[in-house]
Image (tube, grey):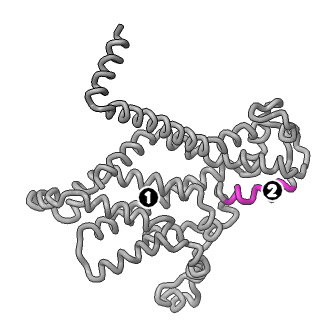
Amino acid sequence: MNKMNKFKSFRERNKKSNGYLLRKTSFNVAYKIVRAILLFGLCFLILQPLLNKISISFMEEQDLYDSTINVIPRHFTLSNYKISMNLLSYWSSLGNTALVSLLVSVLQIISCTLVGYGFARYKFPLKGLWFGMVILVIVVPPTTIQSSLYLNFRYFDIFGLFKLITGDSLNLLDSLLPYALMCLGCMGLKSGLYIYMLRQYFRGIPKELEEAAYVDGCGKVMTFIRIMLPDAKPMITSCFLFSFVWQWTDSFYARMFLSSDFAILSNKLTGLAGALDNYLDARGIAQKAETAYSNAMLGTGTLLTIIPLILVYLFAQKGFVESLSQTGIKM
């Protein structure tokens, strides 16, 4: 009876609106259906390769060549993970990767926050030109300055002082010093993007907050620390997580600055294909991987590399989503 009354009421209102209510309702329903289909397709495109790698990682080599197996392995095994962890030197590489990513993220956030605040709040000579350089850092890929970076840190010197005192320049390669110097100089991975994001956020904070702090006796430094930094916590959280994730999967700077002794996951994953030319299987017998099995092992290694990132996201999901939503409101 309720449904009949609702239908009758809808029909009467639609008649009074000359069919507008029916057209509007039909449009809303069609829009929701199309949106659901697009979201499902987007999620499928993102998740399908990951689910495929998970499925293959539990298959024995004979399952890879069986056309009757699509998703569920017929011969379930964990040996792929054991072999991949052995070839990746997983636990030592995991610790090194976490160390580098954490160091880079912290130093990037410190330097980029200070620079972003300076661009947002202070006037200084050639401010527009310097901000144009920040945009240039975002646009120009780091591969264009690869040789310059390598030579600069291989023969590091400051106005010739080291060569004058010691007779030779410093070799900073095979250490974390190039990472630290680049991050503190706002030339680290994606530093230009973080400066731009933080600048836009600080520009959205009312100046009255700073003026009130000045009236209460705070100087510029204390105002920045006690007023601006707590208010910018959402954006700082976002930039820190972006920096951590991007550095975790970076292999460009890692291959340039770090030696093979200081193994990290991205470098090990790059060399995994070569390692599979002569590896020990689960029984300890030397083997040469076929193409299909080699790809399966690469997929397993990729999963081992991104599992820590997934765990970080699961723990930081609430703060990360809140920071992005608040950032959208502020900006």
Quarter assignment of residue 136:
bottom left
Secondary structure, mark 1, is helix
Please tell me whether residue 129 belongs to the stretch shown in magenta: no
Label 1: how many Cα within 10 Å (few below 14, some 14–19, many 20+): some
Is 225 placed above or below 183 here? above
In space, the residues marked 1 and 2 are separated at their CA atoms by: 33 Å
Residue 124: where, in percent of width, then height?
25, 79
Query: Split into 4 quadrants, where in the image is the N terminus?
Result: top left
Which amino acid lies under the numbered mark 1 shown in the image of this protein? Val
Query: Where is mark 2, residue-wise?
Result: 275
Specify the farthest residue to the top: 1
User: What's the residue type where badge 2 is placed?
Assistant: Ala
Seen at 59% across and 56% down, the residue is 249
Circle nearer the N terminus (1, 2):
1
Judge whether 241 appears above or below 210 on screen: above
Q: Which residues are magenta?
A: 267-277
In the displayed structure, 104 sits above or below 174; it is above
Label 2 secondary element: helix
Q: Which residue is mark 1?
A: 106
Tell me the residue at 55%/72% (across/down): 142
Q: Residues within 10 Å of mark 2 (few under 14, many from 20)?
A: some
Residue 177: give x, y in percent of width and height. Answer: 53, 70
Q: Is residue 220 left or right of residue 11?
A: left
Q: Which residue sits at x=78%, y=45%? A: 83
Give the mark toward the camera: 1 or 2: 2
Residue drawn 60% across and 51% down?
95
Which residue is more in the foreground, 308 or 171?
A: 308
Q: Quadrant of residue 19?
A: top left
Instruction: Give the side of residue 325 with respect to residue 275, left or right.
Output: left
Q: Main secondary structure of the magenta part?
A: helix
The percent coordinates of residue 171 (x first, y second) are 60, 78
Is residue 315 positioned above or below 107 on the image?
above
